[in-house]
Image (spheres, rainbow, N blue to C red):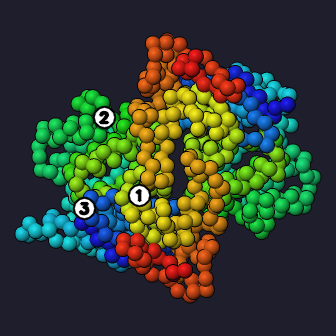
Amino acid sequence: MLKVENLRTYFKQAEGIVKAVNGVSFDLHKGDVLGIVGETGSGKSVTVKSIMGLIFPPGYIAGGKILFHTDEFSSNGEREYVDLAKLPQEDFTRIRGRHIGMIFQDPMTSLDPMYTIGDQIIETLVWHKNINEEEAFERAVQMLEKVGIPKPRERMGSYPFELSGGQLQRVVIAIAMSCDPEVLIADEPTTALDVTVQAQILELIKDLIAQYDGSVIFITHDLAVIAEISSSIMVMYGGMQVEMADTQTIFEDPLHPYTIALLNSIPRLDESRELNPIPGQPPTMLNPPEVCPFLPRCNRASEKCEKEMPRLIEVEPGHWVRCFPK
Amino acid sequence: MKLLRVENLKKYFPVRQGFFIQKIVAYIKAVDDISFEVERGKTFGLVGESGCGKTTVGKTIIRLLNPTSGRIFLENDNLASLKPSELKPYRTKLQIVFQDPMSSLNPRMTVGQMLSEPLLFHGIVKTREEANKVIAELLKAVGLKPHHIDRYPHQFSGGQRQRLAIARAISVKPHLIVLDEPTSALDVSVQAQIINLLQRLQEELNAGYIFISHDLPLVRYMSDEVAVMYLGKIVEKAPRDELFDHPLHPYTKALLAAAPVPDPRKKRDRKDLIGGQVPSPINRPSGCFFHPRCKFRMPICEREYPPTFTLDSSHEVACYLYR
């Protein structure tokens, strides 16, 4: 459905170029739930913003392709690959919301405080689905019911401030799902919520994914959340994907030193053990040298690492690692 | 002798309404009659969701907020009854590390200025030269370099800034440090560094910690004893392993069930999950505050707040199920 090839998104700054995303490639198939994990500044949000066409100056897509399989622009109704990296802004409104839905981290800032939640769902439906307002109203009520909002018909007239954070996130999910997008992107959808509410939203997203025949990209910094929801995982560090495999493999047989170190640095509820922190600080993305971004913090670094950048290699079918073999 | 003994601590915030004549229409009972003890060298963990009052507990103990009632004994002195002017000698014994180092460090002060201030103010050192020597050691103790002394907070990363906040807290050799979500603004790889640093410093200073967090795995890792708060009250308190392995209160069970586990093979137990959200602290439910979300509620839960029942001498739980 979506094929990202060697995507590079840079930001021009007075001090130089910030290489926020530096060569990311992945394929998203129908039914996949791809989890992207990484720390602050690892480029995970910029990756999906590039896909959504939400990169504005001084940011720009410096290279690579984002091929999206869609019939939106074809003349004969057949699906074809459209390169979103080259799509003009005015055409993006036909993709965003209609074919790719997005859920952001903070529901309070992604909803307009001046409009009722009903208006905001109806607006999306009328714009993308060419239906009249009455039909859209009924659809919106159905959507709210589906995401577990009690008394949906009454809630249609509520303003965002009248609902709690968890309820608002449900509304945002309803808006994102209202046009049945083929790809749903969730950028840290549960980070701003409390644990018990986070669990409710995760259960909701899992239930919706089970009924839904599109694919999902789920971004988070929380390894525990990703273990629960995704079918495959891409680990990002310093604007690059350092490892990519199915969820089981990442947790049980990680190969990249960063993935291993990350798994050893989180405390767990179910077992007590020593925490092994990763020494040093996350890298700055300003004018990064052409070597592995994890090199200064790596416990396995060799001379070879200081000379050249490792390539992303497929060590076994479906398991990709950007590191020199041991 | 216990390092800190908190007895029946209450902190209410008035809710005012009106334009010219403001009337107090209600109280937010942020902290409502809680008691606990902390020993030297031990960590007391305080968990709860946002709005449960855990931060207010920390701020009230160090007297950044004045308690509405209750007693706070530090060693033998009741801090709750002291005037602000009488608190100065206790400030060296009590310190706090806040969540966000960017807002707890003054952006216009260099590291040297911000760290020498407590040292000079409390008379720990007499001159700037002496202070600089102590600061160099402090910086080393928290994993920074002595040459960082002339830098400003913006020149550091988030983890390094939190190290500075910790250096400032330990500079007066406190007996008790309140750690209010010290790592929740940090990335996981850096979080582990700070946690290990805090544990090492605890051994060196033999300090008592109050560790406030919403992150259950982290609280389990750090604490010796843990209390769970819900809407201003402690609903359950027990030694660490006892609480996590044998939770009793339905809310504690729900919290533990809700915490995701970083293991794709382990699926969460849906039966303990709860619906709804934390009610507003202005308008708390009658009886047990948790009863609208509780699966085990009985008629009495809607009428009366349960007293605290003590099981096995150290496991306290406020729930009628254990009467």
Decide: is A90 above or below B80: below
**Label 1 secondary element:** strand
Q: Quadrant of the N terminus of chain A?
A: bottom left
In the rendered image, residue B1, in percent from the top left (x then y), is placed at: 85, 31
Q: Are marks 3 and 1 on the same chain?
A: yes
Residue A149 shows which numbered tag? 2
Q: Nearer the viewer, mark 3 or mark 2?
A: 3
Which is more toward the observer, A80 or B126?
Answer: A80
**Label 2 secondary element:** loop
Q: Nearer the viewer, mark 3 or mark 1?
A: 3
Q: Earlier in the sequence, mark 1 or mark 2?
A: 2
In this image, B252 relative to B45: left or right? left
Marks 3/1: CA–CA distance: 18 Å
Residue B304 shows which numbered tag? none
- Tag 2: residue type? Ile
Marks 3/2: CA–CA distance: 28 Å
In the rendered image, residue A84, in percent from the top left (x then y), is placed at: 27, 70
Decide: is B122 above or below B191: above
Task: Look at mark 1 in the image and give the residue it sits on.
Answer: A219
Which is more toward the observer, A76 or B256?
Answer: B256
Q: Earlier in the sequence, mark 3 or mark 1?
A: 3
Mark 3 and mark 2 in contact? Answer it, CB < 8 Å: no
Q: Tag 3: Cα neighbours inside 10 Å, few (<14), some, or many (≥20)?
A: some
Image point 46% across, 64% down: which residue?
Answer: A250
Task: Look at mark 3 in the image and give the residue it sits on.
Answer: A30
Q: Earlier in the sequence, mark 3 or mark 2?
A: 3
Q: Are marks 3 and 2 on the same chain?
A: yes
In the rendered image, residue B264, in percent from the top left (x then y), is placed at: 44, 54
- Tag 1: residue type? Ile
